Amino acid sequence: MLRPIWVLLGFTVLAAMPSSHAGSPNPAKIFRTSELNANPDHYDGKEISVRGYIVFTPEAHILYESKSLNKKWIEAVKENKNNFDPKAWRKYCLTIANPRLLLDHRDALTGKTFVLTGTFLSHYLDGQPVDLGACPLPTAILLDEAEFKRTYLTGPSAALDGQGKVNP
């Protein structure tokens, strides 16, 4: 008769114990840039996965929420050159804090949508010099380069081949 009470007490104690993931985002969840930028302090320092459209230009190393939103932003800039207000578009942009590995495969990645995993930074440039390739908001992802290599650069299902080209 004592055994069921101890088992029940054990489950009760385990259920009451804080999880190491309590309060942190679900690591299996794939975020949109606008979700992260809506509450950046909540995600600061946490490992996240985010889906986005990669934009590499001489003046940018960013992850934009989607290809269609990036296209709409470009059209809005062209149509309203003299009075364009970028504030409505900021939430869709996330800076890639350490783009070197991605830049090594620039031709294969630019203009493609990927899921990137890394640490979310709510105040990317605090105490740092200006980053001319960054988004207007101070948010960024510090890319988990090992995860990117495992997912996209190695193995039979790698999205990029050894020459930095996207496999079909």
Image (spheres, rainbow, N blue to C red):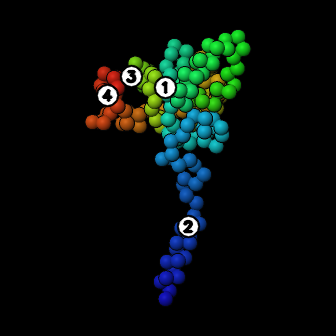
Instruction: Please tell me the numbered disc located at residue 80.
Output: none
Marks 2 and 3: which is nearer the front?
3
Q: Residue 114's spot in the image, x, y percent?
A: 45, 32
Q: Earlier in the sequence, mark 4 or mark 3?
A: 3
Instruction: From the image, tell me which residue sits under label 3.
Output: 108
Q: Is residue 106 above or below residue 15?
A: above
Q: Residues within 10 Å of mark 3 (few under 14, many from 20)?
A: some
Marks 1 and 2: which is nearer the front?
1
Q: Is residue 18 left or right of residue 153?
A: right
Q: Amino acid at mark 4?
A: Asn
State if disc 2 and disc 1 touch (CB < 8 Å): no
Q: Secondary structure at mark 3?
A: helix
Q: Is residue 57 left or right of residue 38?
A: left
Q: Residue 4's spot in the image, x, y percent?
A: 49, 82
Q: Residues within 10 Å of mark 1 (few under 14, many from 20)?
A: many
Q: Earlier in the sequence, mark 4 or mark 1?
A: 1
Q: Earlier in the sequence, mark 1 or mark 2?
A: 2
Instruction: From the image, tell me which residue sits under label 4.
Output: 167
Instruction: From the image, tell me which residue sits under label 1.
Output: 54
Q: Is residue 3 above or below residue 20?
A: below
Q: Amino acid at mark 2?
A: Ala
Image quarter for residue 76?
top right
State if disc 3 and disc 1 touch (CB < 8 Å): no
Instruction: From the image, tell me which residue sits under label 2.
Output: 15
